[in-house]
Image (spheres, rainbow, N blue to C red):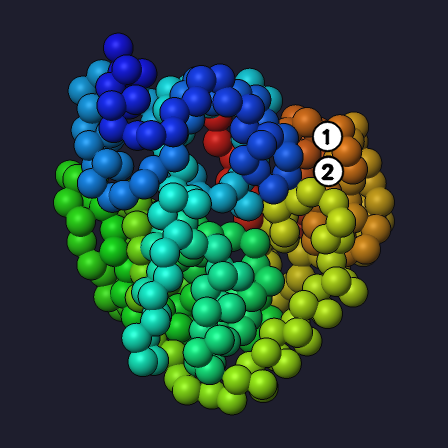
Amino acid sequence: MYLEKLKEIFKEVYINEPMKNHTSFRTGGPADVYVKADRAENIIKAIEMLKKENVEYTIIGNGSNLLVSDRGICGAVIEIGSMMNNISVEGEKIYAEAGALLSSLAAAAAENCLTGLEFASGIPGSVGGAVVMNAGAYDGEIKDAIDYADVIDNEGNILRLTKDELGLSYRHSVIDEKKMIVIGAGFRLKEGDGRAIKEKMADFAARRREKQPLNYPSAGSTFKRPEGHFAGKLIEDAGLKGKTIGGAQVSQKHAGFIINTGDATTEDILELMDCCAETVYNKFGVRLEPEVRFIGRK
């Protein structure tokens, strides 16, 4: 039985674990089995075993960009999070394990008077997910600061991919294309003025509080930015600000955010996303593409 084998590999293994406890949207049914990864070798060992047992598996970070099916997730979910979150600083270089939060990475850079990651201070994701989707905000993206990423390929090998090999572009990387797993990343920064760095981070935080609905569960920007447009403005101009389906709502504060007002299901959120995409296309001829990723049983 694969469950017993997973218990031999990982210290923390949970059965029928509610995914709403592991996503920033606070929705999602149970994962058949949920484990917390503690090191790369155990991830490789587990995946090799699961493949032999013909068991589906899903890799997640801290769930800040995920919509999980209300029917849950089949097979095993492997979380790369709090047990793989070490950050080390050496001169102008920082190495972070994939489970480290971007906010922690940015804080470590600031504490060491290193500039280049201020933009990441308010992004709720983990380093692994941020590298996969080249996360960005305000004046920066991961590709501006990253030096390399350590990944597990489909054959179970650990590879180090350089910045160029990562093929980073807007919300995209070759890691996503090739279904690799990020286990850590190295960043090359520059010395800066510690006070100025912290002031910039505080300014970004204030702007977020002013413009974004941070007091409600969400996954940040729901849609990618269409070329030549802003998703939030298109949705607002389509008259959808405040539009509600079930417990899901287009935020009154920022139409680029769909929020969980308290009792939303994933189905509510998906229906509202479809409504926004269809209305915007019918009115403006612009196709909105989801920035959030849907996983789990259809």
Query: Crowding near pointer 2: few (<14 within 10 Å), some, many (20+)?
Result: many
Check residue 51 in the rendering and tell me which mark sits there, or answer none. none
Q: Mark 2 points at which residue?
A: 260
Residue 217: image location, x then y, percent: 69, 42
Question: Looking at the picture, which amino acid does disc 1 mark?
Answer: Ala
Q: Is residue 108 visible?
A: yes
CA separation, marks 1 and 2?
Answer: 5 Å
Secondary structure at numbered mark 2: strand
Residue at 42% x, 26% y is 34
Residue 262's quadrant in the figure?
A: top right
Residue 283: image location, x then y, percent: 75, 49
Secondary structure at numbered mark 1: loop
Residue 242's quadrant in the figure?
A: top right
Residue 149: image location, x then y, percent: 28, 60
Query: Crowding near pointer 1: few (<14 within 10 Å), some, many (20+)?
Result: many
Q: Mark 1 points at which residue?
A: 264
Which quadrant would the N terminus be assigned to in this image? Answer: top left
Residue at 61% x, 74% y is 201
Residue at 38% x, 29% y is 12
Could you tell whether 41 is left or right of 192 in the image? left
Residue 233: image location, x then y, percent: 74, 59
**Mark 2 and mark 1 in contact (Cβ < 8 Å)?**
yes
Q: Is residue 274 visible?
A: no
| Nearer to the camera, 204 or 68 | 204
